Image: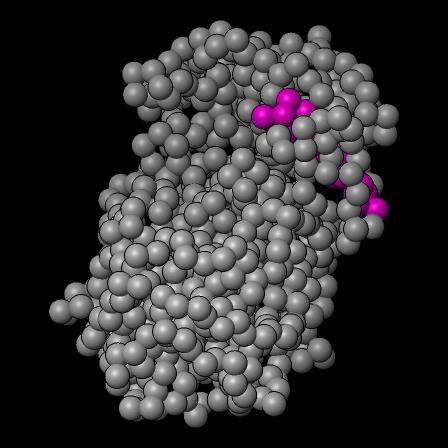
Amino acid sequence: MKAFSITAALAAALAASTTSAVQAEQVFNRIASFPVADNLPEGAERKAPTSAEIITASEDGNTLIYSDSPGKRIGFIDIADAKAPKAGGIVAFDGEPTSVATAGAKVLVAVNTRESFTNPSGLLAVVDVATKKVDATCDLGGQPDSVAVNKDGTLAAVAIENERDEEFNDGQMPQMPAGDLVILSLKDGVADCATIKHVALIGLAEIAGDDPEPEFVAFNSKDEIALTLQENNHIVILDGKSGTVKTHFSAGAVDLKNIDTKRDGAISFTGEQAGRKREPDAVKWLDDERIVVANEGDYEGGARGFTIFDTTGKVLFESGPSFEYAIASIGHYPEKRSSAKGVEPEGLEAAHFGDDDLFFVLSERASIAGVYKDTGAEPELLQLLPSGISPEGVIAIPGRNLLATANELDLIEDGGARAHVMIYERGEGEAAYPQIRSAERDGLPIGFSALSGLAPAADKPGFLYAVNDSFYSSQPTIFTIDATQKPAVITEARPITRDGAPAQKLDIEAIANDGEGGFWLASEGNSDKHYSHAILHVNKKGEIKQEIALPEELRANEIRFGFEGIAALGKSDDQTLWMAVQREWKDDEEGFVKLVSYKPATKEWGAVRYPLNKSEEGWVGLSEIALHGEYAYVIERDNLIGEAAKIKKLYRVPLADLKPAALGGELPVVRKEEVRDLIPDLKALNGYVVDKVEGFAIDAAGNGYVVTDNDGVDDSSGETLFFSIGAIDAM
């Protein structure tokens, strides 16, 4: 049993993915994203939540089929042209589809029809892929969770979970009725209901043995079935033809060290969890003698990684927290939801691509798909793929070099991203993601996320500084970025401190060089959280040396959406700071925001007005300001996401227009000129357009860089986009 340093492995994989074309590795890159709301039938409420949970593919690999449990339907996606997926329609049910599996020209659908937790019921539906007609249904006698089909399409197995009510008795087990396993025969993809066999699983597990809750099921080529009992922390190996239990064993526990165990606004790998039960969710066969399980946890555990067992229960490999270290190194660590179960590995897939045996591990909380090479011993991490929000299901289509993931979460009611199916293709080339990662410090990754502002490193082309925002309220940080590498690398993290401790009650949204080795920072206020709008002066160590509050003329009209950018013009006593206010304050005319000036030497405040674009939905505001040559550059964006996003643009304002007037009086209006529409850049990785284009800086060589804020992976895909837009004309 061996755990390994995935951060080092990831760095090696990233280096390999950026070699010359002659030496190019085979890599996966996302080629399309399909919002499953596009599959809603005519007349349906377009803003009703949708979901894509478990996913499979037709026998020819040209159609994807996913379960949409909240919508009580399954959906079809035409991927004959995988780069341009098309809506393929739905099939509705009188229950909640929980899983799908392909059997020849048919798709088997497990449907939960229960009236209550104590009266579970369900059926297995057989749907013709071509006609989208339900050919047959079988009563399963309980609430199904997952369904699998054997290699030659003659057997199906359904895990009947009969899940517990987590609101009853604090979710304690046992809660009857017990779950079991259903096995039945198939002919030409059609289930023979008369052959249904219920396999009892009572008395196998040490934990709540009289209340087994089967979770996930998988066949090997010998028609053996691997079955996880997640809450029972147990794994069962059965003969698929007879239903006989061949072996069964506890999934065991892991002693976890150097992990983040607190929801405290900081990524800190200093905690421990001793004897942490694995509680596996998904299971896949790597070959006929080995299985891999994703240790999500649900009842009393969750070991944050994956484990490879042989069929006797011997642990052949344990990943421990190394999977989440790799995830943290690309900014996807879900700190706000990580205290108990970390990144929550949940879904799995295994397939043979070319000369490689690969398996794929999904992290629900981090919205990542890890790509591993099965070496027969220690697996090798090859890539981390961005996968929308909360990936639940994954299907490989090796014959077409394709992979697809299904994302269950739909945030339309909160104005967020829709549920998506994302499609990846394997081929020679460079890995497009991540675009930024962190180096190790003391053997652990530098944790980062929610990057909100950029500034150039003086006299050092390709190097920049970034800050994180109030999502990391206990860990405000200045990061050093080496953008000369690909992907860019965060090489240093400087804590922002007050009196020797991490500074509190700050929402750092912007950073600028002070010309003397230190920095000016802009903190956006939020009265609800008792955060004050302020300018901070820190030295090169990140120690706060001065805090500058807003004058009364600004404070009297402030709202939450304050300083989002800061830039310094001039040096020493001639220095003027310019701050971009994100949205209209109480004294602003609609459609105009302030660019505020402050002279540290004289403590003079002033402002000009900036005209915003109009949007039919949401709001429009500023996210950044940078100075270069004869212009000030600003990021102007709406707060919309996906196809609704229209305004993510870089503008410039002549410095000659930055003639501030006194606060409280009439302010001059500046002229603006569009420099670049950033939406094509935000679509370059073939995901949906993210909301928060937050940072922009022009380095010492005159090249522009953009970064997005991933909201700390909280109700976000977690994707941090960091890219250069090339040389910026100073004239």
643 in the magenta segment: no
Residue at the farthest front position = 665
- At which x and y percent is residue 344? 43, 43
Of residue 566 and residue 707, the one placed in the foreground of this image is 566
Q: Is residue 492 above or below residue 708?
A: below
Residue beneath the point at 13% across and 69% down: 499
Q: Which range is magenta?
A: 61-80
Q: Is residue 49 left or right of residue 153?
A: left
Residue beneath the point at 51% across and 39% down: 414
- At which x and y percent is residue 458? 41, 89
Residue at the farthest left position = 499
Q: Is residue 242 left or right of residue 452?
A: right
69 in the magenta segment: yes
Of residue 291 and residue 539, the one placed in the foreground of this image is 539
Q: Is residue 700 above or below residue 394?
A: below
Decide if residue 561 is in sight here: yes
Residue beneath the point at 30% across and 57% down: 556
Of residue 83 and residue 661, the one placed in the foreground of this image is 661
**Quarter of the C terminus within the rendering:** bottom right
Decide if residue 386 is in sight here: no
Residue beneath the point at 39% across and 60% down: 562
- At which x and y percent is residue 604? 29, 78
Q: Is residue 49 left or right of residue 515?
A: right
Q: Is residue 152 above or below residue 673?
A: above
Identify the image quadrant of residue 426: bottom right
The secondary structure that dominates the magenta segment is: strand
- At which x and y percent is residue 415? 54, 42
Number of marks present in the image shown? 0
